[in-house]
Amino acid sequence: QVQLVESGGGLVQPGGSLRLSCAASGFIFSIYPMGWYRQAPGEQRELVATITNGGKTNYTDSVKGRFTISRDNAKNTVYLQMNSPKFEDTAVYYCYRGGRIAPATAYSWGQGTQVTVSS
């Protein structure tokens, strides 16, 4: 049974930093792409970042240069380092497991973690 458990969300000031973690279990973590979506109130869910099993990364334009996705296959964990967050980054962030030939397609989701950017 696939399980994805996010942690690390909370309140952060603009220009600060926050690191989200997603602990995975129930599948062979190292062979699957992983990533993060987010959903702000009243908005559609948006793809934020992906990382392939080989470590190749992709980001939505609005977070390039500020957010970094990484993975630790020994710990079955994927991370999202959020630097210099902006008010518009406020959202619920969801970890997902991608498809092996469709990295941006989510086949499993975590429960989400709230990130609020506020001064």
Image: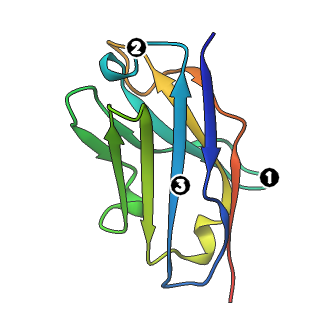
How packed is label 1: few (under 14 Cα within 10 Å), some, or many (20 or more)?
A: few
> What kind of residue is marked 1?
Gly
**Which residue lies under the disc numbered 2?**
28
Residue 79: give x, y in percent of width and height.
43, 48
How packed is label 2: few (under 14 Cα within 10 Å), some, or many (20 or more)?
A: few
Q: What residue is at 54 percent from the left and 76 percent from the top? A: 86
- Quadrant of the image occupied by residue 61: bottom left
The C terminus lies in which quarter of the figure?
A: bottom right
Q: What residue is at 44 percent from the left and 38 percent from the top? A: 77
In the image, residue 74 sits, relative to residue 117, either above or below, namely above
Instruction: Locate residue 35 relative to residue 22 in the image: left or right.
Output: left
- Quadrant of the image occupied by residue 104: top left
Q: CA–CA distance between discs 3 and 2?
A: 21 Å
> What kind of residue is marked 3?
Leu
**Which residue lies under the disc numbered 1?**
42
The answer to whether marks 2 and 1 mark residues whose Cβ atoms lie closer than 8 Å is no
Residue 11: give x, y in percent of width and height.
69, 74
Tell me the SS state at disc 3.
Answer: strand
The answer to whether marks 1 and 3 mark residues whose Cβ atoms lie closer than 8 Å is no
Q: CA–CA distance between discs 2 and 1?
A: 35 Å
Instruction: Locate residue 40 relative to residue 35 in the image: left or right.
Output: right
**Which residue lies under the disc numbered 3?**
20
